[in-house]
Image: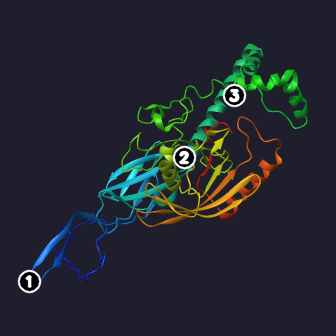
Amino acid sequence: VPNSSNTSQHHSTPGSRNVSFTDLYPGATYEISLVYETSSTNFTQCASHPSVTTSPPSLRGRCENVASGYSALIVWDKAEGVLTKILVHMNGKNHTVDGKEDRFTIPGLQPAKTYPVALISMSGNRISGPFDFICATDNRGVIAGSVVGVLLFAVLVCAAAFILLKSGKKSLIAGSKKTGPKKTTISVATFPEHFMLLSADENRGFSEEYESLEPVGKDQTHKAASLPENKSKNRFTNILPYDWSRVKLITPSPSDTLDYINANYMPGYNRNREYIASQGPLTATVPDFWRMVWGQRVKGIVMVTNCVESGRTKCDCYWPEDQKPCLYGDLLVTMSSEQKEPNWTLRNFRVKNRNNSEERTVKHFHFTAWPDHGVPQGTQVLIQFRGLIRQYIESEGITSPTVVHCSAGVGR
C-alpha cells in the first residue's frame, strides 16, 4: 500500500511464499500488510512490514562548461520518482545535492582537462547505480594563461636586455645558470657508464640515490588515514595514503571514516588516474576493497603477492576459493574460471550488486613467483606478465583504473 490514499491488493493461494507488485512508483515508500482469510468476511493479520522503498529513478547527466575552466556545471534531467538526495562524484570528492535540484557547480578544477563523473540518485537508504560520463573543462583559461605568460616573458626579456646593455656585464646570465635546475637526464649513449659508476663500491651510488628520496612526500598530509576510526584499516602505521590522492569510497554523505580505504590513484602514460595502488586487503577491509572495485568500475586487479609467504599472512584471500559465490557487503562475487600457470594465476570474477542486480566481470591477474623480501631472478617472466595485463587493458578498451596491490601497497 503506498503512503498515498491509493491501495492495492494481491491474493495468493495457500502455500505460496511470495507475491510480486508491478508498476510501482520509483523511490516511493510503501506500507505492506500480510493477512490471511479465515472466511469470506474475516481477515486476520499475521505479519506486517513498516515500510519498503522502491529503487530510486536513474538519472542521466551531462557537463556544461563554465568560462575559464576552473569549475564545471553538472546538469541532469529530472526523473519521475521520489528523490531525497543526489550524489555527484567528481575529482575524487563526493558532493551531496538536494533531490529537488537539477544542477550543481563543482569548483577547484583545472582548465582543458577531462574528469570522470558519477551521478547517483538516492531515495531514503536506497541507492541507484551510477550514471558515468566524462566532463571536459573549458580551455580558455589555459589559452589566456599562455598569452599572459608569453607577454610576461617578452617583458622580462626586454628588461634583462636593457640591464645587460646598461651595465655591460654578463653576471645576470651567469647567475641565472647557477640557480637553474640541475640536469638529471642521462643519454642512452652514456647510460652504461653511468650504471657502472653507480654500481661501484657495492652499489653505493644506487644507495645514495635511494636515500635522497627519504624526505619526498613528508610535507603532504594524510589526516584521513590517521583518524582513530581508520587506523585499524591500515596494515602498517607508517604507510598511509595522501589526502589529495587517496581513493574515496562512494558513500551517501561525505565522511572521512566511511569513505576511507588505504589506496591511492596513480598516473599512467594515458591518464592521471590510470591505476590504483592499494594495500593487500585485511580481513576487516575485504568488503571495502570490493566497494572500491565496484565504485571505480574496475575491470582488472593485479596482485603481486601471495596470501601467505614464509608462514606469515601477507594478504587476506578476498575472493571465493571455489565456484560457490561469496557475499562481501552488498556485492556477490563468484569465481567463474581459474587458470593456473607456473608463475601466475588468471581468474575471472562475476560481481553482482544486490541493490540493483547489476553484474560486471573483473579479471584477476595474480603473479605468484615474487619472492618475499626480494625480486624475481630475471625480468623475462615479469615482462611477460605485464604484457598479459596491457593486452587485456587495450583489447577491452578499458578507461577505468586498474587496481595493483601487493601486501603493504608500496614495496613491489
In the rendered view of the protein, which quadrant contains the C terminus?
Answer: top right
Which circle, 1 or 3, is nearer the viewer? 1
Q: Residue flagged by tag 1: what amino acid is it? A: Thr
Residue 385's label in the rendered image is none
Q: Nearer the viewer, mark 2 or mark 1?
A: 1
Q: Earlier in the sequence, mark 3 or mark 2?
A: 2
Tell me the CA gap for discs 3 and 2.
28 Å
Q: How many marks?
A: 3
Label 1 neighbour load within 10 Å: few <14, some 14-19, many 20+: few
Quadrant location of residue 372?
top right
Tell me if I can see residue 284 in this picture: yes
Q: Earlier in the sequence, mark 1 or mark 3?
A: 1
Q: Secondary structure at mark 1?
A: loop
Evaluate whether residue 68 shows in this view.
no
- The residue furthest bottom is 40
The quarter of the image holding the N terminus is: bottom left
Name the mark on residue 41.
1
| 187 left or right of 324 in image | right
Query: For the point 65% across and 39% down, which residue is it?
Result: 311
Front in this rendered view, residue 97 or 401: 401
The CA span between labels 1 and 3 is: 98 Å
Residue receiving disc 3 = 157
Residue at 61%, 36% in the rendered image: 149
Q: Locate residue 293 relative to residue 23 in the image: left or right.
A: right
